[in-house]
Image: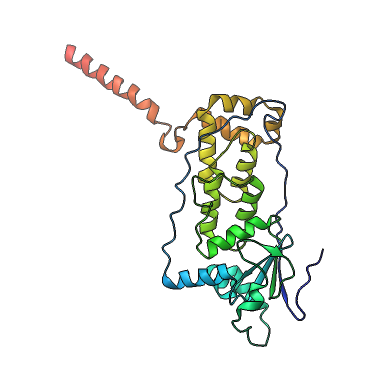
Amino acid sequence: SAVAGPPGARACVCRSTMSVNRIPKIGANGEQPVKLAIRGPAPPQGFQSSALAVELRELYLSGSCCDVVLICAERSFPAHRTVLAARSPVFRAEFVASAPNASSPSCRGSPAAAAGSPGRASAAGAPGREFRIFAASNHEAVQFMLDFVYELPGPLGNTHTPSPPIEIVKDVLRLADMYKLQGLTERASAWLCKDATTDDILERMSLCRDFGLDTLRSKLLEALHANKTALKQIVTDPKVLQYPELMQSLLKQVAGPQPDSDHEPDDEPRTPSKKKAKKGSGKGRGKK
């Protein structure tokens, strides 16, 4: 349904062309999922915030001086266009393209504060310039993105916090990809290393493929290879046949590294026989 906005407000619409594919779960026929221990990259370290960053974060948390409202799944998130534009070239281009001829709204806290606290998303339709986001279907993903943009500590980098549902992780990766937030991709990748089981391994492998997380994909394969119980559950499930690429990767992992044929010329294996022939001819001459 349409989101009602203030009179005269312009809405920036950002759409995603990425389709949502349902990945079947392994071991859904009564087998208990096997937990996987994945040695992924270390979680990103905490931000070293400057005094300006701290003050901007306080404005964000209090809902003061906000001049844009991000809309996702009927939830609104007040924010600052300048901060979003500074962190993301995509936001910057969107704001420049949709800028009205009139001057920007002045800094006033009351309209933005009416939108609700950023930490608790309010119902859509709050005053402010709307920026509708369709790249995510879970509003929690937008919250995590804003926490990253404003350098807020949170569960993205906390190794002791349980991972969110895989659907939210997927949306975070989509937002990071769409708005060119590399640091957010790294934080979401750390999530994919936690609480992995054979139940959702295909989903995690699919995300690695879609978002180019090759290092994490290798870690997942290593974890499968190291856990024989998990590996057996994967290869004996008929649903895995729908993913020949995964099967091929598992076979390569089991086979181990292959010798590089480019460094083995055709005449190299014949070298020992030539040496033997020389030795034989030398011995014959010595006897004479």
Give the image quarter of residue 269.
top left
From the viewer's perspective, tell me whether residue 201 is left or right of residue 127: left
Between 127 and 217, the one lying in front of the other is 127
From the viewer's perspective, tell me whether residue 274 is left or right of residue 137: left
Residue 131 lies, in percent from the top left, at 69, 70
Looking at the image, which residue sits at the far bottom?
Answer: 102
Between 148 and 61, the one lying in front of the other is 61
Answer above or below: position of 271 versus 221.
above
Q: Residue at x 18, y 11 (%)?
A: 287
Q: Is residue 284 visible?
A: yes
Q: Residue at x 52, y 40 (%)?
A: 218
Residue 180 lies, in percent from the top left, at 57, 62
Between 93 and 43, the one lying in front of the other is 43
Report the colour scheme. Answer: rainbow
Between 245 and 220, the one lying in front of the other is 220
Answer above or below: position of 288 versus 96.
above
Q: Quadrant of the N terminus?
A: bottom right
Looking at the image, which residue sits at the far top?
Answer: 287
Give the image quarter of residue 140.
bottom right
Give the image quarter of residue 252.
top right
Q: Residue at x 65, y 41 (%)?
A: 203
Residue 173 lies, in percent from the top left, at 60, 54
From the viewer's perspective, tell me whether residue 192 is left or right of residue 236: left
Residue 286 lies, in percent from the top left, at 17, 15
